Image: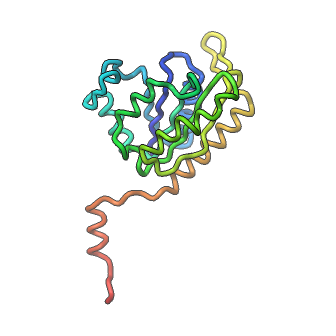
Amino acid sequence: MLVVSLGGSPSLRSRSGVLLDRSRYWLLEHGVEVVSYQIRDFDAQDLLHARFDSPRVIELLQQIENADGLVIATPVYKASFSGALKTVLDLLPERALAHKVVLPMATGGSIAHMLAVDYALKPVLSALKAQEMLHGIFAEDSQITYGEGTAAAQLAPVLQQRLDEALEQFHSAMARRPKPIGPDDLNERLLSSRWSI
């Protein structure tokens, strides 16, 4: 299995990035290959001028095409998800998430921002035709504590449990999703099938 991880924070140190890192480690431990992107990996001019032919955007799209799922995380700004993340998503074609399982996550200062996942991020992901959208995770900033120096960030136990459960569901959903049949495979199946009239 292959998963694309996409982070919406422009900061090197971000709580949404911590959620993505934890998700990546969990998935790797369960035999899933993970390719990670952050919005800061994309040239600002490419995003600002909507350059669909940007090499980095083309690379992201190719990885998504090959992926079984997408894990996406964003900080909440002004009751919505990151504007820079929206510009990246706007460069993807309409059916970019067809046949994909998507796990959306967000972090914010208070529980008041919790609905940003359902009312801001999920509609955009649905417009990209995600096959299956899992229940999103919202984490309050206070539930993620940065470690001192090189120490790893810590998640509140309740958040860690929710994240583990969501990743279990994500992994199961990818395992059971129907695989698209390529034209050559479909033709071979039709030719080798026994037909009766």
Near-viewer residue (2 or 46): 46
Q: Residue 142, relative to residue 72: is it above or below? A: above
Place of residue 122 in the rendered image (x, y in percent of width and height, measured from the top left): 53, 40
Place of residue 106 in the rendered image (x, y in percent of width and height, measured from the top left): 59, 30
Query: Residue lying farthest right?
Result: 157
Q: By what rule are the colours in the image chosen? A: rainbow
Instruction: Determine the residue positioned at 63% across, 35% down.
Output: 115
Query: Residue lying farthest top?
Result: 149
Q: Residue 54, relative to residue 173: is it above or below? A: above
Q: Residue 79, relative to residue 101: is it above or below? A: above
Instruction: Determine the residue positioned at 39% across, 22% down.
Output: 41
Q: Is residue 105 left or right of residue 87?
A: right
Place of residue 5 in the rendered image (x, y in percent of width and height, measured from the top left): 47, 34
* Quadrant, the C terminus: bottom left
Q: Is residue 186 left or right of residue 31?
A: left
Instruction: Determine the residue positioned at 30% across, 66% down.
Output: 186
Place of residue 13 in the rendered image (x, y in percent of width and height, measured from the top left): 55, 16
Can residue 65 be seen here?
Answer: yes
Q: Quadrant of residue 185?
A: bottom left
Q: Across the whole image, how many numbered discs are drawn on residues? A: 0
Instruction: Determine the residue positioned at 36% across, 23% down.
Output: 42
Can residue 33 be seen here?
Answer: no
Q: Quadrant of residue 191?
A: bottom left
